[in-house]
Image (cartoon, coloured by chain):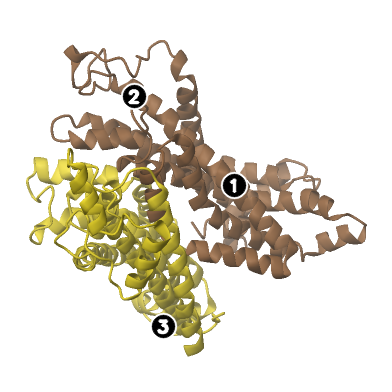
Chain colours: A brown, B yellow
Amino acid sequence: MSVALDPRALAAAGDGAGEPHAGRATLWSDAWRRLRRNRAALVAGAFLVVVGALAIAAPHLPFLADPTAQDLRLSATPPSRLHPLGTDDLGRDTLARVIYGGRISLLVGIVGTLVSLVVGVTWGAVAGYRGGRTDEVMMRVVDVMYSLPYIFLVILLLVFFSRSLVMLFVALGLVQWLTMARIVRGQVLSLKQQTFVEAARALGAGDRAIIFRHIVPNVLGPVIVYTTLTIPDVILQEAFLSFLGLGVQPPAASWGTLVADGARVLALFPWLVAFPGIALSLTLLAFNFLGDGLRDALDPQVRRERS
Amino acid sequence: MMAFIMRRVLLFVPTLLAIATLTFFMMRLAPGGPFLAEKDIPVAVKAELMKHYGLDRPLPVQYARFLVHAVRLDFGPSYKYPSRQVREIILEGFRVSAELGGWALLFAVLVGLPLGVVAAHRHNSAADHAAMVGALAGVSVPNFVLGPVLVLGLSLSLFVFPPALWQGPQSRVLPVLTLATAYVAYIARLTRAGMLEVLRQDYIRTARAKGLNERAVVWKHALKLGALPVLSFLGPAAARIIMGSIVVETIFQVPGLGRYLVNGAFSRDYTLVMGVVLFYAAFLMALNLVVDVAYTVLDPRVELA
C-alpha cells in the first residue's frame, strides 16, 4: 500500500516527526518553512537584498565613480578595466549610472506601492467591513475608475503638470490601488462571516479589536503577496513613463531613462542599453519569482497548482 | 441579457462625459498652450490663430462648444496638422494600432496556449519547468528593453527585418514580436494553471477510462474548460496592449494612435488629445462589455449583475 503514497506526503510526514508539533505552528512559521524549500524564491530574495544594499550604499561605495562626473576624453568607451560597464557619450561611468538609476527605480517602486497600499487597504477594508450601502457606493467608484483609460490620464497629468517625483508617485499609486482595494474587500467580506469572528464578537470584542486582532492578520497574507507583485509593476510603469520622457528628469536617471537614452544610440554603443536593461529585467524577474514563492507559501491551497 | 447590455451602454454616457470634462479642464488649466512651439510668430498672427480656433473665448463657452460638437463626433481640425480633421487622424491611427495589437494578441494566443497545455500535461517535467521559467522571464523583460534588443540582433546585425517604420509585411515582424512576448508568457501561465485544475477532474478520468486517446482528452475535452481563464484575460489584455503599443509605436516609428496621443499632448494639440482619449475610452468600455457578455455565453454559471 505504500506504493500509492505520494513521495511529497512522505517527506512532509518525516518533517513532522522530526520536530514536536505542539500545535504552535502559526501561519507564518508554516509559510516560512515552505518558502525556505523554494530555491528560486530564495535566490530571488537574496538577489533583491544585494540590489537593495547596493542602491542604499551607493554614495558610500569606494570603488564607485561619481555618476555625474563627465570626462569627454572617455566619451562612449566600451567596457574596460577602469569602467567595467563602459561609459556613455558624456564619459560618465555606466556602472555608477546603473546603480544610481536603481536607487531611483526602487524608490519609485516602493513609494508608489506604499501609496497604493495605504489607499487600497483602507478603502477595501472599510467597504468590506461596513458592507451594505457603503460597500456598494465605494465599490461602484472603484468599478468606474477601473473603466477609465488610466494610462492616458497619467500621461496627460505628467505632460501638462510638473514632472516631479512626487507627481510620479501620486500618478502611479493612483493606478495601482484599485486592485488592492478589491482584494482586501473580498477577503474582509468572507472573513467577517467566519465563525472565529462571530466567536470574538460573542465574547464581547468591539469593532476595533475585531478589525485589528482578527481580520487584519488574516488579510496580511494576500496583501503581502500582492504588494510584492505590485512593486515590479510600478517599477515597470515608471520605466515606461521615463522611456517616453515623462518620468524622472535629468540629471537624475532611473533604469527607464537609461534604457531610453541607450536605445537612441543603440547601433553605436549597445552596452548603454544592455546593462540598464539587464539590471531592470533581472530585478523585475526576481520580484516576480519572490511574489510567486510567497503566494505558494502563504496560500497552501493554490500552492503549485496555480502559478 | 438585452436589458443588461442596454444598462451598460447607458452608463457609457456619464462615464464619457466625466472623462471629457476631466481631460478638458486638466488640459486647459495646465501651463502652456498650442502654437508655442513655433518660434517667433508675431503677436497679431498668434491672436488671429487663437481667434480662429475659438481659444480666445471664456473657458465655459469653449467647453460648451466642445461638448456640442463632440456629440456629433466632430472634434474639429488638429492644431498640429491643420489641414486634417481629428476624426480622420483617429481612424487612420486606429487602423494601424488595431493591426499591430491584433497580430500581437493572435500570436500570443497561438503560441502561449499550446505552451501552457504542454506544460500542464507534463506537469513538473523538465519541459514544464523550462516553459515556466521562460514565461516568467517573458513577463519580466519590459517591451522597451526587448524592442531595442530585437532591433540590435535581427535587423542591425542580421539585416533580416527593417529596424523601424510601418511599410510592407516585413516591417510588422519586430513590432508585433516585441508587443506579443509578454502576452505569450502570461497566456502560457494562465493556460497551465487552468489546465492543471481541469486535468484532475472526474470527467477527464472518465474520458480516459473509456479509452479515449490522450490527445483528444487533453486538446478537446480539457482545453475547452482550461482555456476559460485565457478568454477572460483577453479583455484586460486588449486594454493593456494599448499601453504597450504606445511604447512599441515610439520605438519602431509606427504611425499609430498611441504616438499621436503622446505627441499631441506634448504639443498641446487640444483637439487631437481630446479625440484620442474619448475614442480610446469608448473603445475600452465597449471591449469590456463584449468580454462580459462572451463570458456568460461560455460559462452559464456566471450571472450578469
Q: Residue B27 vs residue A83: left or right?
A: right
The reply to whether label 2 and label 1 mark residues of one chain is: yes
Q: What residue appears at the point 20 percent right and 46 percent down from the top-left corner?
A: B44
Residue at the extreme top of the image, as rendered: A62
Q: Earlier in the sequence, mark 2 or mark 1?
A: 2
Say which quadrant the C terminus of chain B sits in: bottom right
- Whole-angstrom CA distance, mark 3 to mark 2, is 63 Å
When the figure is inspected, residue B83 is found, relative to residue A35, above or below; the finding is below
Quick one: SS at disc 3? loop
Q: Nearer the viewer, mark 3 or mark 2?
A: 2
Q: Is residue B1 visible?
A: no
**Tag 2, which chain?**
A
- Dividing the picture into quadrants, the one containing residue B177 is bottom left
- Residue under pointer 3: B211
Quick one: SS at disc 2? helix
The reply to whether label 1 and label 3 mark residues of one chain is: no
Residue at the extreme bottom of the image, as rendered: B2
A236 or B108: nearer the viewer: A236
Q: Position of residue B160 (x, y in %)?
A: 8, 50
**Tag 3, which chain?**
B
- Residue under pointer 2: A97
- Whole-angstrom CA distance, mark 1 to mark 3, is 52 Å
Q: What residue appears at the point 25 percent right and 13 percent down from the top-left corner?
A: A81
| Image mark for residue A117 | 1
Q: Position of residue B214 (x, y in %)?
A: 37, 75
